[in-house]
Each structure stands twice: as C-alpha cells, then as structure tokens.
Image (cartoon, rainbow, N blue to C red):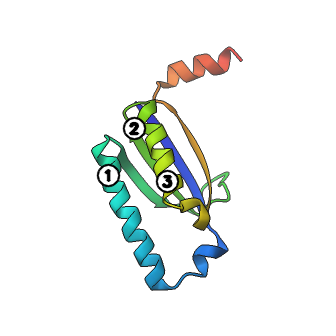
Amino acid sequence: MYIFVELWNARPEWLALSEEERGNYMQQVGAGMGELAKAGIEVICWAANDPSTTHRCGYEYLAVWKMPDEEAVKLFEETVEQAGWYNYFEQVNAGGAMSTPDEIIGRIMNL
C-alpha cells in the first residue's frame, strides 16, 4: 500500500474563473475521482490547513490518499496532470510505501 499527500494553493488562474466555471471544473474532478476509486485509489481525507498548526507549511489545502501499488500511483499522477489541475493550483506532493514507525526510525538511524 502507498500513501500519497497533496498540498496546494489556488493560482491566479483559478481565482479568475467564475463560480460557474469553478463548479463545472470540480464536477469533472469529481467524475475523475470516481474512476480512480474503481482502480482502488481511496481518499482518506481532504482538509484546509489549520493556521494554528505548529511549523505549518505554506499551503492552504491538503489531500491524503491510499493506493494499492505503484501502478495506481502512476495512474493517479497521470489523471491529475491530464485534468489540468496544475493549471489552477500550485502543488507539491509526497508519497511512499506505507511503513511502520520502527522501519522508518531504522532508516533514519542508518543515514
């Protein structure tokens, strides 16, 4: 299993759209999310980044996804790209195979 985290801010191109245009685009995104779900890609959550978070990053929104394998990760990344998401949102991503705290601590210890 893989975890994939997106962090994003709206670009001026998004802010320039009318409410109707934004709604139409998000309907398309919703349909795409349905297709991703068929591939076993699961939304864990979407959230607004809480301003009171300690050591807060500079992104306003985040999404956490769970995916069955690297093939699903590639499908997800291609789908987001093809949807034109990056035209409207400045985004960074993080992801990796799910692991345990002990496994990751071991990796950190062996740097």
Q: Amino acid at mark 2?
A: Met
User: Which badge, 1 or 2, comes first in the chain's sequence?
Assistant: 1
Name the quarter where the N terminus is drawn.
top left
Q: Which mark is residue 67?
A: 2
Q: Quadrant of residue 17?
A: bottom right
Rendering coords of residue 21 (x, y %): 47, 80
Q: Position of residue 81 (x, y in %)?
A: 54, 53
Tell me which residue sits at (59%, 16%) in the image. 106
Image quadrant occupied by the C terminus:
top right
Pick the front one: 62 or 87: 87
Vertical arrangement, residue 41 with respect to residue 2, above or below: below
Residue 98 to residue 110: above or below: below
Cα distance between the residues tagged 1 and 2: 13 Å
Give residue 44's position: percent from left, percent from top.
38, 48
Which of 44/79 is in front?
79
Q: Which residue is mark 1?
A: 35
Residue designated by label 3: 80
- Residue under the image location 52 percent in, 19 percent down: 103
Label 3 is placed on what type of residue? Answer: Val
Q: Secondary structure at mark 2?
A: strand
